Image: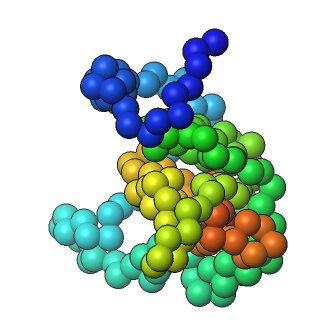
């Protein structure tokens, strides 16, 4: 087992390995069931189609659901603790965790990033990187919303993620 460094600075070799791993294609197993054609794009202007305005908020959930998520009324069923992770390691861990949670039928999960109290409030590399990780192409369609957890669930050092339920059709 390799030993982790406590320094947060990555070497040029580690950066090169990380960038190379991002370029490698990940082969996914075939899905069960028949192939489904994607729904037409709301901006599709092909003949006979009128653009349909989106009624969904920009983050994928309505206001009442967002409040329930923020207040802890939608209880998380799984937790990922990122204490001790580097940002590059967190990208991989969060992606795998969220995709596994969706495959397992989990609706709400907690991601603990930890926090560093600064003069301007809670900060931290992982805490600031999590929204960017969630907006990545691999997770954009899976995560409906992300809200800071209530105090009893980790407060400023944790986030609740609402996950899209996979259709069984």
Query: Relative to residue 65, is residue 30 drawn left or right?
Result: left
Task: Give the quarter of the image for residue 47.
Answer: bottom left
Residue 149 higher or lower than 85, as above or below: below
Which quadrant is the N terminus positioned in?
Answer: top right
Q: Residue at x 32, y 63 (%)?
A: 41
Seen from the viewer's position, the closer of residues 154 and 100 is 154
| Residue 108 or residue 39, whichever sits in front | 108
- The picture places residue 150, in percent across and down from the top left corner, at 73, 76
Question: For the point 80% across and 77% down, which residue is it?
Answer: 73
Tell me which corner region of the image, top left, top right, bottom left or bottom right, holds residue 67: bottom right
The structure residue drawn at horizontal position 55% and vertical position 62%, both measured from the top left corner, is: 116
Q: Is residue 167 left or right of residue 105?
A: left
Residue 125 is left or right of residue 3, and the answer is: left
Residue depicted at x 62% and y 46%: 82
The x, y position of residue 110, in whole percent, is 70, 58
Q: Could you tell me residue 39's position as x and y percent?
A: 42, 58
**Is residue 126 depicted above or below 150 in this figure?**
above
Q: Can residue 71 be seen in this snapshot?
A: yes
Q: Residue 165: tell me if it is visible.
A: no
Q: Is residue 97 above or below residue 160?
A: above
Residue 95, compared with residue 50, is above or below; it is: above
Residue 112 or 10: which is nearer the viewer? 10
Q: Position of residue 144 (x, y in %)?
A: 55, 65
User: Quick check: 108 left or right of 35?
Assistant: right
């Amino acid at each position: 087992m390799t030993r982790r460094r406590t320094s947060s600075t990555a070497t040029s070799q580690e950066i090169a390995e990380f960038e190379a791993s991002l370029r490698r294609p990940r082969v996914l197993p075939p899905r069960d069931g028949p192939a489904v054609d994607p729904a037409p794009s709301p901006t599709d202007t092909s003949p006979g189609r009128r653009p349909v305005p989106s009624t969904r908020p920009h983050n994928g959930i309505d206001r009442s659901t967002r409040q329930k998520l923020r207040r802890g009324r939608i209880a998380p069923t799984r937790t990922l603790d990122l204490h001790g992770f580097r940002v590059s390691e967190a990208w991989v861990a969060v992606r795998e965790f969220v995709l596994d949670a969706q495959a397992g039928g989990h609706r709400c999960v907690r991601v603990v990033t930890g926090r560093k109290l600064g003069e301007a409030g809670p900060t931290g590399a992982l805490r600031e990187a999590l929204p960017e990780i969630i907006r990545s192409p691999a997770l954009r369609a899976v995560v409906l919303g992300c809200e800071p957890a209530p105090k009893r669930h980790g407060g400023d050092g944790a986030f609740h993620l609402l996950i899209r339920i996979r259709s069984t059709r």
